[in-house]
Image (cartoon, rainbow, N blue to C red):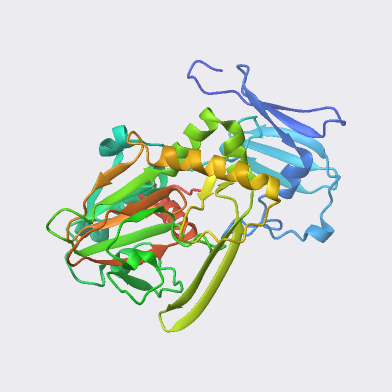
Amino acid sequence: MNGGGVPRWSTTDSSSGDREIRLDDGCGGGSRYPHVWLRNNCPCSSCASAESGFRKQVIRDFRFSSAPARLEIVSNDKLYVKWDDSHESTYDLQWLLERNFNEGQELHENQQVKWTAESFSAIFRSFKYEDVIKSDETLLQWLETLTVYGISMIKSCGLEQDRVKELAGRVAFLKKTQYGETFKVEVNTDATNLAYRSTYLQLHTDLPYYEYTPGVILLHCIVQPESSGGESEVTDGLSVCDRLKEMDVDCYKTLSTVPVRWIDRGHDAGYNFHNVYVSPVICEDSYGNVKRINFSEHHRDSKFPVSIDRVHIWYDAIEKFVKIAYNEKIISTFKMKPGDILTFDNHRVLHGRKGYQGSRLLIGGYLDWDLIKSRTRVLQSQLSNTNIN
């Protein structure tokens, strides 16, 4: 490294057996890149689209055995490679460093932060509806809060029943389900969904019987009983899973591997439906992190697709999961006010409601995480004037 603190990059081609290039910064740091990956990601106009950066190469014709014939660092910020078939590639060093293969470099965006009843008041952020609608900066703050903590409140939304659709329009569009594009949560004795009762509604996630279950729930409070009752209950499912794994890893493995049949059938939004999806309570991603929780006592089918010797094992595990979820140190309770829109991660947050007397009306809708993450990246890029890949 020179006197100005700028790395002096150099490059070497490893032995032919390793088939990789090493970049060294001159002070002990560096990264390695396989020949085949570099050639496959050549940014030249013949190999990649200038507009999008996406590959134009035809994989059927790709030469997987490509090797460098010449390497050179250009202006200390670019890597030049001439390949053994005379093709030439020039890579931006910063671009390469953002794509290094060092161990532990997991592709996570906005790391999730877990919470309990003790920390809930500190993480439960509120945003004004007008600010989210008019300000891209506030919109981004709201979306990043949802991503990190899984829950937030939008305040001062008014009582107009189109607010959920307007809020979703700042992101993309609502996800239409068997309950329509938006839905009313109020007493309806003819409905099959227990949310349409005034009795206690236990902790659950919505629509576990969907393969592509909605990612975020938007609930706009229009009418709320003035007396006690109707309070919302929420639990961070990630914290529940962590506690369960600490207490009994076998129970955690049971809930993350044993398939459960989730079901819903009835009539709503003008048509009959009969949905079935089979999945464990806890779903993990390729890194072993919890990516989705399916939990709804009402919608867990009596058909249980497991061998009889695993039934008691599963029930023992779900009993421990439930006890943690309802533990007073884990669960949080609050009461929405008319004009509030509660927004939360349906893949993560278990939610319920205390029983009530009198009138209560919520307008609900769903957003998909794919759309939220896309909008977040666009806003981050626009507001920072950088290209986020």
**Position in image of residue 90 (x %, y %):** 67, 43
167, 19: nearer the viewer: 167
Image point 75% across, 32% down: which residue?
21
**Position in image of residue 384 (x %, y %):** 38, 46
Q: Is residue 294 above or below residue 91?
A: below
- The quarter holding residue 175 reads bottom left
Q: Is residue 67 toward the left or the right of residue 76 in the image? A: right
Q: Is residue 179 visible?
A: yes
Image point 61% across, 34% down: which residue?
250
**Position in image of residue 42 (x %, y %):** 70, 49
- The quarter holding residue 240 reads top left
Q: Total number of numbered labels? A: 0
Q: Is residue 68 above or below residue 178?
A: above
Residue, far bottom: 270
Q: Is residue 93 toward the left or the right of residue 266 in the image? A: right
Q: Is residue 17 toward the left or the right of residue 31 in the image? A: right
